[in-house]
Image: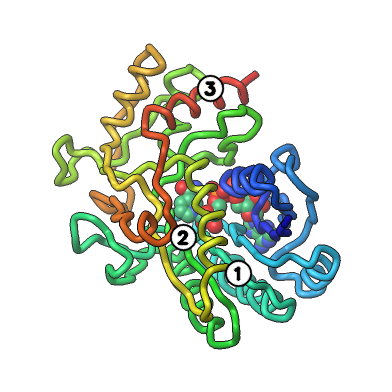
Amino acid sequence: MTVTVLVTGGAGYIGSHVCKALAEAGDKPVCYDTLEKGHDWAVQWGPLERGDIGDKARLDEVFARHRPRAVIHLAGYIEVGESVRQPERYLHNNVTKSDALIDAALRHDVEAFVFSSSCAVYGLPQTDLLAETHAIAPLSPYAESKARVEQALGEAAGRGLRSASLRYFNAAGADSGGTIGEAHDPETHLLPLAADAALGLGPALTLLGTDYPTPDGSCIRDFVHVSDLADAHLRALDWLGRRTANGHEAFNLGSGAGYSVRQALAETARIAGTPVPHEVGPRRPGDSPKLVGDIAKARRELGWSPQRDLAAQIEDTLRWRRKMSR
Ligand SMILES: NC(=O)c1ccc[n+]([C@@H]2O[C@H](COP(=O)([O-])OP(=O)(O)OC[C@H]3O[C@@H](n4cnc5c(N)ncnc54)[C@H](O)[C@@H]3O)[C@@H](O)[C@H]2O)c1
């Protein structure tokens, strides 16, 4: 049976991959996006309903028209640094407006709600691998916004909403079909910036700190392919559908392995066949030396495991950046 799913932020990087995965599974993604940051060319697998998640009347109209059984909520502002400079703007767009979306989901009897959270909710790691049981201690308004929406979903469970928050680590790569990929402006993520530097499409990359207490001094991160992330959303919907009680659960989505920024650059250079021009800069405030997820819960409960390694993520990124530049 075809399930209609409202995908907020579906015109963005991860949301467009989620829409593709839904369509390939036989479901109908309805993309709900302002296009403030997203792209109409990324909406290829279902209708685009232009709208803001804070707009109650527009939400009611779209829910009534499409009657989605589930919501996948990816819409939001995503830049940690910008959130430090403009905290109110982030809390308004990401939290207050998410509250409006959650209320709409409750009004329209949505059966499952999946939210894009972030490993940023953990703050400074107290353990080597971050499990979902790690303390929540956000270090930026962006991370705070994710923690607050998770909390709101926990409260909405008491009003009848069944939900899962997916705490992504570093999303990377692009769809193998070559028609969607990361297109942020400004781009702040490591792999596209490294790819652009290697391909001569962008400036030399700045390494944000090389004096961290890690083997090579650069930060260690956990990169996960965006198509693997998309697959996890479908599994989370299935998992919620099998639940008998309302509730809210969080799942880490990463690869379970860490690579340093320098290792990621070396791998980009190897695959591109050309060095990645780079320079050393100061640390960025709020960056943790190491963020690597324990993904046992997603493996066990969702039956999910990442299929595409760092090399695959870099190959897809290089191909996508080349294509975007043409
Ligand atoms: N990219 C990552 O590595 C990463 C990591 C952790 C969490 N996340 C989360 O995943 C989600 C998607 O990230 P992305 O990288 O695809 O970002 P993106 O900017 O490409 O996509 C976000 C989309 O949301 C839309 N949007 C923003 N505010 C809106 C609003 N009020 N109403 C309707 N649409 C709105 C934008 O137009 C955009 O299309 C975000 O919530 C982000 O915080 C991303």
* Residue behind label 3 places its C-beta within 8 angstroms of ligand 1: no
The location of residue 135, given as percent across then percent down, is 28, 71
CA gap between label 1 and label 3 equals 35 Å
Element type at marker 2?
strand
Q: Residue at x 74, y 65 (%)?
A: 68
Residue extending furthest toward the front: 1
Q: Which mark is residue 70?
A: none
Labels 2 and 3: the sequence-earlier one: 2
Q: On the picture, is 299 further left or further right than 105?
A: left
Instruction: Give 236 or 118, whichever is nearer the viewer.
Output: 236
Question: Mark 2–mark 3 contact, CB under 8 Å?
Answer: no
Of tags 1 and 3, the one toward the viewer is 1
Labels 1 and 3: the sequence-earlier one: 1
CA gap between label 2 and label 1 equals 13 Å
CA gap between label 2 and label 3 equals 27 Å
Q: Residue at x 56, y 26 (%)?
A: 320
Q: How is the image coloured?
A: rainbow
The residue where tag 3 is placed is: 319
Q: Residue at x 70, y 70 (%)?
A: 54
The vertical placement of 270 against 302, above or below, is above
Work out which quarter of the rendered image holds the N terminus and state it.
bottom right
Q: Which mark is residue 112?
A: 1
